[in-house]
Image (cartoon, rainbow, N blue to C red):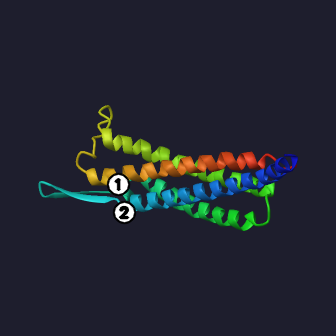
Amino acid sequence: MANNEAKFSENQPWKTKKLFFVTQIFFRIVAVAASLASSWLMITSKQDIDIGGIVLDARYSYSPEFKFLAYTNIVAGCFTLLSLLFLVLFARQGSNPSHYFFLFLHDLAMMSLIIGGCAAATAIGFLGKHGNSHTGWMKICDHFGRFCSRVTMSVILSYISLICLLILTVTSASKSRKMEV
């Protein structure tokens, strides 16, 4: 019985490390995919409509908030992909708490970047969907439905990326707290 308990206690840390790495890899892949898909959706979102012989168009590039979201998602997606490569390369060398500290700083920076883009795009998207009668801003989603749907999906994917980066930040922080100063 004592022999089985010794085997179990030896295997437990390896299983915990393996679970940590699988979790890190999974959430990094999801964050990269969601960020880059969000950027692609935002950059390709455009719609032209004809109202009484006048052609109106809606494009992401007309809004600095939508451009900010698209570019922050590109940056966060690329840097998170680099952090995934960093994680895979250093996973073979064993667990060094200083590596987790750098991952924590990276995840925190990318999460902060994405949260800024999400907040800006959500605010302007809400304005486009509902308007603001006090300032005279009209709704545009009544006329540009396809454009608004693509932008909404882009923002949703950005929030998915944000949630993944939040989980990564928390897990990296918990692993890096074992670092000796």
Residue 10 at x, y percent in the picture: 82, 53
> Could you tell me how many numbered marks the image carries?
2
- The reply to whether residue 4 is in sight is yes
Q: What secondary structure is found at the residue carrying circle 2? A: loop
Q: Quadrant of residue 139?
A: top left
Q: What secondary structure is found at the residue carrying circle 1? A: helix
Q: 10 Å neighbourhood of mark 1: few (<14), some, or many (≥20)?
A: some
Residue extending farthest left: 52
**Residue 44 — which label?**
2
Residue 44 at x, y percent in the picture: 36, 63
Picture residue at 76% right of the left edge, 66% below the top: 92
Q: CA distance from mark 1 to mark 2?
A: 9 Å
C-beta proximity under 8 Å, tags 1 and 2: yes
**Residue 150 — which label?**
1
Residue 55 at x, y percent in the picture: 19, 59
Amino acid marked by disc 2: Thr
